[in-house]
Amino acid sequence: MTISIGLLVFPNVQQLDLTGPYEVFASAPGVTVHLIWKDLAPIRSATGLMLAPTMLLADCPQLDVICVPGGAGVNALLTDAVVLDFLRHQAAEARFVTSVCTGSLVLGMAGLLEGRRASSHWNAVDLLPRLGAIPTEGRVVRDGNVITAGGVTSGIDFGLTVLAELVGEDVARRVQLSLEYAPEPPFDSGTPDRAPAELVAQARAGMAASRAERERLLPPVS
Amino acid sequence: MTISIGLLVFPNVQQLDLTGPYEVFASAPGVTVHLIWKDLAPIRSATGLMLAPTMLLADCPQLDVICVPGGAGVNALLTDAVVLDFLRHQAAEARFVTSVCTGSLVLGMAGLLEGRRASSHWNAVDLLPRLGAIPTEGRVVRDGNVITAGGVTSGIDFGLTVLAELVGEDVARRVQLSLEYAPEPPFDSGTPDRAPAELVAQARAGMAASRAERERLLPPVS
């Protein structure tokens, strides 16, 4: 029996949020990965790479895992009733309800993070209380059947964690080996507490407009 | 002035070899990333994700960086005169001649690794002497203007290293921060010496047919 994993794909998705876990999942035998959107036309990701949906949102059968990646395009999903309804519908029966990066904001807007510990990109995790979630820094945060990843590259750690849950740790380890995932970042600037303050300020400035829009779209602090 | 980076894309490319460094490069200001192939029709990657070329090989202007990713599809490139000529032509003037994973076998077949230290996927690095290269295990191996990465996910470490060379370490660190690249693999099985022997044997078995084909196509040991 095939395990089906659905990754939402949408305009201005951060492609590595999606392509990282995709490669982990699709490298395992017996796993089918769908890229789900409202139509099948190619979609421009945030940094330009084109991605082709493979499954219409309207036609999507029940998935074992639903996953929402992040990126600037998340903002348009926060108030998209079709997407939020789809996520609620899938989440009711899915084994795992998941996100990478700012995809957790979309899960939250669908009401799926109420009272749950959840992660997000470091520049968004503080917004999670506005969605009823308990903000929890971490590359992979699990609360029941809700598994949320931190920013972008966390999706690879997340993918291996979810894969181990689905098909066992041995298969996940074999996929890790085949992808030679023994990372050695050449610099130590992957989180705000490790990067120089000036670079953190520059990164925040680069994301300020998108973040301001999110703050307008999310429910107020209750 | 824009820095232009060209990633070769081809049928059965390992998409994360390409999408990892793509996201690193394309997240930096002033960098343009091209996906280069013989035609512009969408291409199926090794695990199914479709990729769309953006630049015809025949039309490609001189690049600052040429990069060959790996994957099962590499085998067809090893004897592809059009591709090998293109790589030699670009390499003559490029600032950096690079590869991820088994892409180094293609650079080698183009004669670009003669006498150079070079890396590859752990299951291919031992083949490099047949191409005149000095096999060197490592996630990022530099010899002059030739920079070769190890397997698949090494491409992210590689991307940050190359980006720092092109636009400075501060920009590379800022990209690392925006991609939250502070990896925490949930398991320690990313290399053959760290994974259980049984899993290494299984992984080798899964790649045996592709490797046997490579061995037939590469020049014999001299």
Image: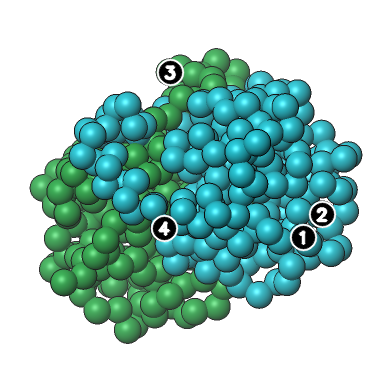
Chain colours: A cyan, B green
Q: Are marks 2 and 3 on the same chain?
A: no
Q: Quadrant of residue B6?
A: bottom left
Describe the element under mark 1 as helix, strand or loop.
helix
Q: Decide: marks 2, 1 in contact (CB < 8 A)? A: yes
* Marks 1 & 4 on one chain: yes
Quadrant of the rendered structure where residue A142 is?
top right
Residue A25 located left or right of residue B140: right
Q: Does label 1 lie on the same chain as label 2?
A: yes
Residue located beneath label 3 in the image: B193
Q: Name the amino acid type tagged 3.
A: Asp
Q: Residues within 10 Å of mark 2 (few under 14, many from 20)?
A: few
Q: Could you give the CA–CA distance between mark 2 and mark 3, rounded to whole angstroms?
A: 47 Å
Mark number displayed over residue A209: 4
Q: Amino acid at mark 4?
A: Ala
Q: Give residue A14's position: percent from left, percent from top.
A: 50, 54
Q: Whole-Å distance between the Cαs marked 2 and 4?
A: 27 Å
| Viewer-side label of 2, 3 | 2
Which residue is located at x 66 percent, y 31 percent? A133
Does A86 sit left or right of A134 as displayed? right
**Where is the C terminus of chain A found, in terms of image quarters?**
top right
* Viewer-proximal residue among B71 and B209: B71
Going from N to C along the chain, the mark reached first, 2 or 4, is 2
